[in-house]
Amino acid sequence: MVHGMPDNKPLLAAARGRADEFYTRYEDVERGLTPFRDAFHGADVLLDTNDGDWSAFWRFLSDRFDDWGLSRLRSLSHDPTADTLFASDDAGGRLYERTAAGVTERRLEGSGSFDSPEARAMAREADLTVGNPPFSLAGRYLSGHAGQGLLCLGPMTACSYSDVFPLFMAGRLHICSPNKGSMFFRVPGYKDLDRADAVHIEPDGVPAVGVKGVVWYTDLPGGCPTFTPTHAYDPADNPFYDNLPKTIVEAGSAATVPADRKGLVGAPISLLANWPEGYRLVGMFPGHLPEGVPRVSPMIGGRPTFRRLLVERI
């Protein structure tokens, strides 16, 4: 059952309260990973976002271990008390490892956090790292893993972070899913959140909340979803900016990206999840721009726009 309409209030509440304890559903893992099935064949796969032996990522890949031909599956469980005054004698993260011989478990020296020295060493060793990092740490996670074999969930807005966008410009990272609607995440501690937030009750009784703007990021071969622009250039839909050269026009959405005008266009960052065919990425306002383009936040009619990419029809 569903109450209300999904929005991002649950994500904000979790960031304030339970430290991003949003868990991916099995069916969403299946939808995200299956298109990359071939990348898992013979691969040493690491789950480094507090997956343990219970997360949907661990369960899904364990179920496909033989069929997809994984060589090894390792999963970290994070212990936030490790290396603190509250640590018990057996404190520390856990490592679960599956091979053809079966599953083993051992305690780690550190907490098991994705940015711990042990986890970073495992990520460098692995062929592919998969997971759902805390969204509040998405920038650090993406910038630290891109180029090592990565497939993970994250907020759409992370593509515009100062340490992430250069990876898009360099072709080292891209979004491989459309930014449409909401994705539901299991939240066992939902009682700590605002009961007015939208809730979907899973078949096992665990609540899930809808979060908008969630996409899959990867550095694996392939591109993001694309579309063919059909909009004819119209000054009403594609005005000039107040504070930029009159060679750059605005496209407030994918639907208004002009199909018949050569040159530069400012467009929302959501284009990185739905790319217009025949265009190339040039930069992003205000800090990632080519020579000669003013480093300003675009304005129309005296009002600033939202974050804008700079793209060019070729």
Image: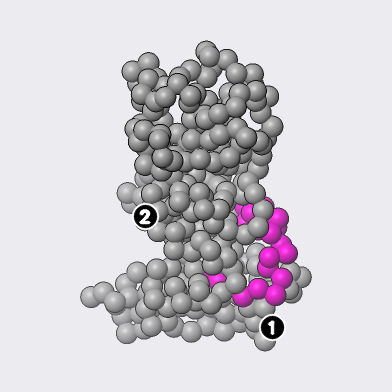
Question: Which circle marks residue 18 in the picture?
Answer: 2
Task: Tell whether position 83 is magenta.
Answer: no
Q: Position of residue 3 (x, y in %)?
A: 52, 35
The N terminus lies in quadrant: top right
As displayed, is residue 12 above or below residue 246? below
Q: Which residues are magenta?
A: 28-47
Residue 79: image x %, image y %? 38, 72
Q: Residue type at mark 1?
A: Ala
Q: Which residue, given by chain and number where applicable, does mark 1 sit on?
A: 100
Q: Residue at x 57, y 56 (%)?
A: 218
| Residue 310 against residue 237 in the figure, above or below | below
Q: Residues within 10 Å of mark 1 (few under 14, many from 20)?
A: few
Classified by dominant secondary structure, the portion drawn in magenta counts as helix
Q: Amino acid at mark 2?
A: Arg
Q: Secondary structure at mark 2?
A: loop
Q: Quadrant of the C terminus?
A: top right
CA separation in Å, label 2 and label 1: 36 Å
The residue positioned farthest toward the right in the image shown = 67
* Residue 207 picture location, percent across and down: 51, 49
Element at badge 1?
loop
The residue sitting at 68% across, 65% down in the picture is 39
